[in-house]
């Protein structure tokens, strides 16, 4: 075995997991210097919370979220400020750890249209009125919001959807399920989408 002092956190973790197949106390000081390998050690070797490593795990949004979800299996209050720094992780934390709305992140989530749409769809499970002004600023996410959240025509979002030939076509096809005369001039600007539109309608 190579000199322990020269081992990386990854190598020390893998040796504990694959060779020792148990905790390796002498190497833990090395493993717990890296959030990723400290997380994997807690999951696959320790198989429970590893309080001595939590200080390092909670400095990384992604590994802190996974630790809360897979190790703590619940909210990890002292890591939430870190998790909030990564909106994608914050969304997953709300969805899978809190299992509901997380008001502290909602203003931040609204700044990312993809996540705002997903937050409405997956967490609020319905219209998210506070975010609609942001969502309706982009034809793609306005379309998806109408399709998956409203599940029908969204009059307020149509003005932006009909600025895009792709999303105007998709909206006519999937949401209106018929001709959308107001959008036809836009759809005509893209021969591919206009051809599909003409074939269907």
Image (cartoon, rainbow, N blue to C red):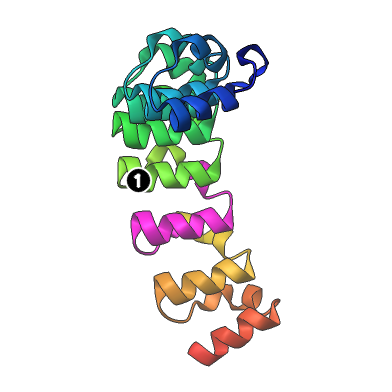
- Residue beneath disc 1: 122
Magenta stretch: residue 81 in it?
A: no
Principal SS element in the magenta part? helix
Viewer-nearest residue: 142 or 49:
49
The image shows residue 119, relative to residue 102, as above or below, that is below
Could you say which quadrant of the image residue 11 lies in?
Answer: top right
Residues packed near mark 1 inside 10 Å, few (<14), some (14 to 19) or many (20 plus): some
Residue 67 is situated, as x and y percent measured from the top left of the image, at: 40, 25
Viewer-nearest residue: 190 or 100:
100
| Residue with the most extreme bottom position | 199
Magenta stretch: residue 140 in it?
A: yes
Over which residues does the magenta segment extend? Answer: 132-155
| Residue with the most extreme front position | 1
Q: Is residue 11 left or right of residue 49?
A: right
Residue for point 54% across, 44% down: 113
Residue for point 63% across, 71% down: 165
The image shows residue 147, relative to residue 4, as above or below, that is below
């Amino acid at each position: 075995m190579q000199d322990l002092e020269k081992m990386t956190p990854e190598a020390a973790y893998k040796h504990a997991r694959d060779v020792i197949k148990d905790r390796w106390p002498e190497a833990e000081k090395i493993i717990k210097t890296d959030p990723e390998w400290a997380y994997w050690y807690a999951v696959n070797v320790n198989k429970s919370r590893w309080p001595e490593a939590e200080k390092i795990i909670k400095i990384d949004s992604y590994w802190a979220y996974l630790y809360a979800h897979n190790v703590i299996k619940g909210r990890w209050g002292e890591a939430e400020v870190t998790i909030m720094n990564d909106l994608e992780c914050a969304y997953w934390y709300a969805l899978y750890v809190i299992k509901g709305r997380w008001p502290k992140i909602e203003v931040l989530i609204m700044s990312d249209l993809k996540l705002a749409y997903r937050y409405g769809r997956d967490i609020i499970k319905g219209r998210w009125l506070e975010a609609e002004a942001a969502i309706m600023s982009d034809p793609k996410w306005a379309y998806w919001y109408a399709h998956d959240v409203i599940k029908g025509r969204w009059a307020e979002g149509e003005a932006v959807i009909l600025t895009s030939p792709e999303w105007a076509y998709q909206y006519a096809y999937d949401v209106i399920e018929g001709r959308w005369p107001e959008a036809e001039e836009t759809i005509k600007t893209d021969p591919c989408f206009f051809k599909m539109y003409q074939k269907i309608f």
